[in-house]
Image (cartoon, rainbow, N blue to C red):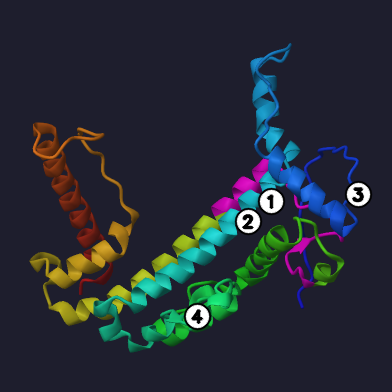
């Protein structure tokens, strides 16, 4: 077991409450109040505050509204977990990929028959639903022969998954039993997960970059295997298989600027026709960029 090295920070925010959160009933009432309070923000618009003071107050208001900071981290971790799950399932159902990587079938969800009184239980198995990065790597190693998550990131990702679990099931309060399980963050028993906004933003950026790292590693593996099977001049002939794979990988995240019009236009109108033409133009530019990128990386 690794020893934690990074202190999970607390925002210096005081809280006054008459609810005893160390009891089950008190904690239940407190969580209900927390949920209600998420709808209420203090008014920083008036009084004697300067513009800079109001801006600073709004920046820190998230920590007055526990568990907003914890919920933001929760959503970031869930987004990464859902991405891995969804990405794996879509690849398993994509025929062009399964031809080259038959083991992708093991990433497909399988329905579980349930009686009517068991509808609250899981309705399917989910191989890529693992939150442990080592197990995620093992799944992709078996199916694609690639391990997209660096082993050096295991402790931090495992701790963030534990934070997600703590937010979801334990009122965002660190339990004594969970303290030894942390491998990256230094935490205290009874500590409320309420870090400052800068920490939350940095953590969300880290989680997003982790997802893109996974995507890039899998994309590189797929194209390195598939492109040689398409033909010697795949970058010039635009074969349908290549175009479908580019679209499957969402045009590699490239962005092009549109000339408009934007908004809603009724079918059959001049504006609607212009929108269709502009959409086709943007798609062509995206395809060109993707092919140029692939040619630079994989052409002999």
Mark 3 vs mark 4: give the one in front: 3
Q: Residue at horizontal 86%, vertical 59%?
A: 24
Q: What secondary structure is marked by label 1?
A: helix
Residue 190 in sight? no
Numbered label attached to residue 127 = 4
Mark 1 or 3, nearer chain start: 3
Q: What secondary structure is marked by label 2?
A: helix
Q: Which residue is mark 1?
A: 70
Residue 53 in sight? yes
Mark 2 or 3, nearer chain start: 3
Q: Is residue 221 left or right of residue 227?
A: right
- Quarter occupied by residue 33: top right
Disc 2 from disc 4: Cα separation: 21 Å
Disc 1 from disc 4: Cα separation: 27 Å
Give percent across and percent down for residue 223: 28, 73
Q: Is residue 260 left or right of residue 43?
A: left
Q: Residues within 10 Å of mark 1 (few under 14, many from 20)?
A: many
| Mark 1 in CB contact with mark 4 (< 8 angstroms) | no
Q: Is 206 located above or below residue 195 in the figure? A: below
| Mark 1 in CB contact with mark 2 (< 8 angstroms) | yes
């Amino acid at each position: 077991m690794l020893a934690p090295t990074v202190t999970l920070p607390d925002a210096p925010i005081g809280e006054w409450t008459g609810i005893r959160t160390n009891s089950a009933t008190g904690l239940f009432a407190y969580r209900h109040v927390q949920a209600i309070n998420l709808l209420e923000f203090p008014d920083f618009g008036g009084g004697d505050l300067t513009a800079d003071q109001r801006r600073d107050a709004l920046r820190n208001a998230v920590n007055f509204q526990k568990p907003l900071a914890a919920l933001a981290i929760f959503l970031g971790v869930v987004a990464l977990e859902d991405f891995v799950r969804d990405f794996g399932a879509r690849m398993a159902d994509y025929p062009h990929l399964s031809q080259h990587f038959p083991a992708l079938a093991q990433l497909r969800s399988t329905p579980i028959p349930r009686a009517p009184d068991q509808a609250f239980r899981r309705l399917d198995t989910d191989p890529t639903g693992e939150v442990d990065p080592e197990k995620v790597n093992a799944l992709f190693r078996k199916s694609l022969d690639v391990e997209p998550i660096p082993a050096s990131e295991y402790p931090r990702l495992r701790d963030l998954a534990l934070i997600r679990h703590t937010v979801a099931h334990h009122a965002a309060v660190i339990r004594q039993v969970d303290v030894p399980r942390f491998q990256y963050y230094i935490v205290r028993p009874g500590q409320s997960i309420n870090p400052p906004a800068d920490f939350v933003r940095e953590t969300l950026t880290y989680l997003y970059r982790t997802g893109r790292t996974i995507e890039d590693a899998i994309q590189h593996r797929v194209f390195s295997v598939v492109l040689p099977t398409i033909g010697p001049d795949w970058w010039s002939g635009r074969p349908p298989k290549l175009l479908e794979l580019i679209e499957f990988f969402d045009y590699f995240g490239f962005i092009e600027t549109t000339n408009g019009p934007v908004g809603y236009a009724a079918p059959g109108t001049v504006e609607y026709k212009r929108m269709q033409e502009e959409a086709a133009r943007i798609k062509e530019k995206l395809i060109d960029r993707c092919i140029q990128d692939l040619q630079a990386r994989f052409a002999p």
